[in-house]
Amino acid sequence: MIGKSRFAALVFGAVVALAVVPLVLPEYYVGLVARALILSILATSVSLMLGHLGLASVGHGVFFGIASYTVAIFTRHIADSTWLACVAALGVTAGAAAVFGLLTTRTKDIFFLMIMLAICQVFYGIAYSWRSVTGGDDGLPGILTRQMAPWLDLRDTSAFYLFVLVVFLLTISGFWVLINSPFGLALRGIRDSESRMKALGFNVWLYKYLAFIVSGFIGGISGVLNAYYDLTPNPVNFGVILSSTALLMVILGGPGTLAGPILGALVIVFLQDFVSGITDRWLMVLGTVYVLVVLLLPEGILGALNRMLRPRTEPKQEG
Amino acid sequence: MEFWIIQALNALSFGMLLFLLCAGLSVIFGLMNILNLAHGSCYLLGAYAALSAIHATGNFLAGIFAGVATAAVTGFFLQKFLLQRIYGKRLLQVLLTMGCMFIIGDISIIIWGADPMTLPKPAFLRGSLMIGSIIFPYYRLFVIGVGLFFGILLWFLQEKTKWGAILRASVDDEKMARAVGIKVPALFTVVFIIGTGLTGLSGVLGGPFIGVYPGVDLEVLLFAVVVIIVGGLGSMKGAFLGSLIVAFLDNFGKALFPELAMFTIFAPMAIILALKPTGLWGKS
């Protein structure tokens, strides 16, 4: 791996680059980068389960969707306050994760994947058919207030972008602290050998359960941000396509890395924007990206870069 | 009373359709450890291909043949040219089959358009059976019969024939099966073709009452996944009984609480998972 000072320099460079986006890019592209940052938070929540517990999920869109709908329903029916709506949405999402976690953390491997898929599809179906509450496939308008503070109005694209960036940096830093804490180490221990961790006296189930709730919470953060980006939550945006694409972003960027989900999200968001300008067949292109990533880039962009750079800079020493 | 009998018969026919849908997924998983998320695409292709064939020839049997063949050929290509390259890599298989589902779904929109369509019923199965005040379409009785037939046939093939013994041996101990001269890769391909072909058949048979439309691939995939969660992976008995359970819950859920039909699937799935995480008849 790269040295500590180079790592710090890379992080600093990336943060500066993201911070100057509103100054150098046209408004439209600022919005796109904001969308990529939002989705990269979702991908990070998938990456927590995949990279640190070895559990692949194609259903994390459910947290994204629950958070977005809570924001919309809250501002529509309860109180027209941005902060309260955000807090309520995060609370509801964490609660939902605590309930789903009771089911999912008892399962392993492919069963985990299937139950997440089922949960996501079921909630997609509810959002679709429970029209009186969710508005069905018309979506649910109602997010009008976007005044976070007298000096922070999210209607302004640059302000919204900077808000997303701050939340993004806080989330990623929190994630980084978490995976480098004893908790994160224990998770990777469970990933590598559950029985060994049990024998060492760890409450394996509790670790998995807590990790799942944290993962759902992070997914909820991205969903809240998305509510203020999209403004009209719609079931079409929260189904299996979003969920599995979040997984794809993790693999495409580089599984097990901090920057991988971000890189993957940027690639997919900009590709979608580019393709949508040419043809309506985005899903076909997306599907082709899935197939190509699996066949040609299974270690992701960062993994491939790492492999290309390694033989020259750092001869392999194993013994 | 009639309401309950008719709903129960509806649920039974839906259950048999689900069984045809899930049997392939379950066998493929049991043997090869592959969760084929493009499974719903085989349903979609089966139904669409049958639709085209029936429009061209006017013959339902031609539709069955076209549907089964299209799904099986797709399965063959998927297994032989894509999945075989990443054998044993679970995560990549999931992504690959998911991608194939998107591609097939989008190509189908180009070929058959985005409007919902239903397949015509075969001429000899139009009309309904009437006993007293109970009216039940012949077509659904036919589906029940086909489902039962395949249930018995698959059970017989698996338990009572040499081919079934070879299959079970390869599931239990792949290395030993190879050592005694069973051509496991060829067996995998054959099972994949049979599994996807059967799914194509479920598309043809489901076409007249579920219909076929963009997105039906994901919907039937959800049903298949729930059946497997309830019944357990890799067991034919689990697929059969799981299909019946899910069909009854779904049918009565939709009839009694139309807006919340999804919860009536979700709740029992949750309860069963809480009690037995590997499904009711699954191998742990």
Image (tube, rainbow, N blue to C red):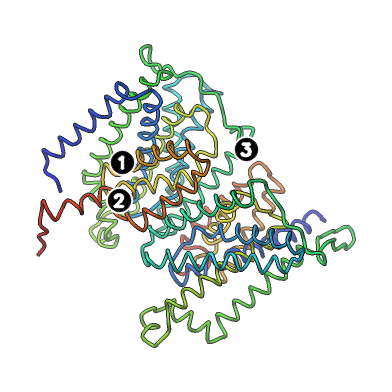
Q: CA distance from mark 3 to mark 1?
A: 36 Å
Q: Residue at x 55, y 49 (%)?
A: B106
Residue at disc 2, secondary structure: helix
Q: Nearer the viewer, residue A98 or B224?
A: B224
Q: Which mark, residue A263?
A: 1
Q: Nearer the viewer, residue A238 or B4?
A: A238
Mark 3 or mark 2, earlier in chain: 3
> Which numbered disc, 3 or 2, marks the residue closer to the eye?
2
Both marks 3 and 2 on one chain: yes
Q: Residue at x 87, y 62 (%)?
A: B130
Chain letter belonging to callout 1: A
Q: Nearer the viewer, residue A32 or B278?
A: A32
Q: CA distance from mark 2 to mark 1?
A: 10 Å
Residue at disc 1, secondary structure: helix
Q: What is the quadrant of residue A108 in the picture? A: bottom left
- What is the three-letter code of the residue carrying label 2? Gly
Q: CA distance from mark 3 to mark 2?
A: 39 Å
Q: Which mark, residue A130?
A: 3
- What is the three-letter code of the residue carrying label 1? Leu
**Circles 2 and 1: CB distance less than 8 Å?**
yes
Q: Position of residue A202 (x, y in %)?
A: 26, 54
